[in-house]
Image: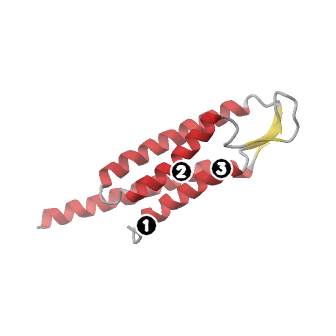
Amino acid sequence: MLQRIQTIWLLLASVCSFLTLKFPFYSGTNAKAIASYPLTGTENSLLLAATLIVGLLSIVILCLFKNRIMQLRLIVLAILIEAFLLFLYVRQVQTFTVGTYSLTALLHGFIILLLLLAARAINKDEKLIKSSDRLR
C-alpha cells in the first residue's frame, strides 16, 4: 500500500481538501456589505459536507488498495463531488458585490489533478496485474 505512488496522490488530495476548510476561496464585500469577508469551506453546511466527503473519500480510497476497480469508481465519484463543490463555490461568489479570488482557490484544481493522477496509477497497476495473469 505505502509503496504505490497513488498513496501519495491520495494523501495529498486529502490534505488539500482539508486545507480548503481553513483557507479562503474568495474574499471581498458580500451581499450584507461586510468588507474583507472570506469565503471558506465552512461558509454553509453543503460546502462543508462536500469538502469533508472529498477528504474522507480520499482516505477511504487509500484503504481499499486490494480492490482497484472500486478505487477507480470512488475516485470518479470524488472528482464529480469536487466538480460539484467548485460549482457551489462559484454560485456563492456571485453573491459578493466586489472581491478577488484567493491564491488558495487553486487547491480545488490541485485536488482534481491529484485524483486524476491517482486514477492513472491505479489503472496502470490494474493493467500490470491483468498482463501478469495472462502469462500464468
Q: Which comes sooner in the sequence, label 1 or label 3?
A: 1
Q: Which residue is mark 1?
A: 5
Residue at mark 1 to residue at mark 3: CA–CA distance: 23 Å
Q: Residues within 10 Å of mark 1 (few under 14, many from 20)?
A: few
* Disc 2 to disc 1, C-alpha distance: 18 Å
Q: Nearer the viewer, residue 97 or 131?
A: 97
Q: Position of residue 116 (x, y in %)?
A: 46, 52
Q: Which amino acid type is shown beneath numbered disc 3? A: Thr
Residue ID at (36%, 56%): 64
Q: Quadrant of the C terminus?
A: bottom left
- The kind of residue tagged 2 is Gly
- Seen at 31% across and 62% down, the residue is 125
User: Residue 113 location, x and y as percent?
Assistant: 52, 53
Q: Which quarter of the figure has residue 39?
A: top right
Mark whose residue sits in front, 1 or 3? 3
Q: Are marks 1 and 3 in contact (CB under 8 Å)?
A: no
Q: Say whether marks 2 and 1 touch (CB < 8 Å).
A: no
Decide if residue 35 is on the left or right side of residue 94: right
On the image, numbered disc 2 is attached to which residue?
Answer: 55
Local crowd at mark 3 within 10 Å, few (<14), some, or many (≥20)? many
Which residue is the site of mark 3?
Answer: 20
State the residue lying farthest toward the left.
Answer: 136
Residue 104 spot, x, y in % from top left: 70, 52
4 vs 37: above or below? below
At mark 2, the secondary structure is helix
* Amino acid at circle 1: Ile
Residue 21, percent from left and from top = 66, 48
Q: How is the image coloured?
A: secondary structure
Quarter of the rendering containing residue 1: bottom left
Task: Establish if 101 lies above or below 2.
Answer: above
Mark 2 and mark 1 lie on one chain; the one further toward the N terminus is: 1
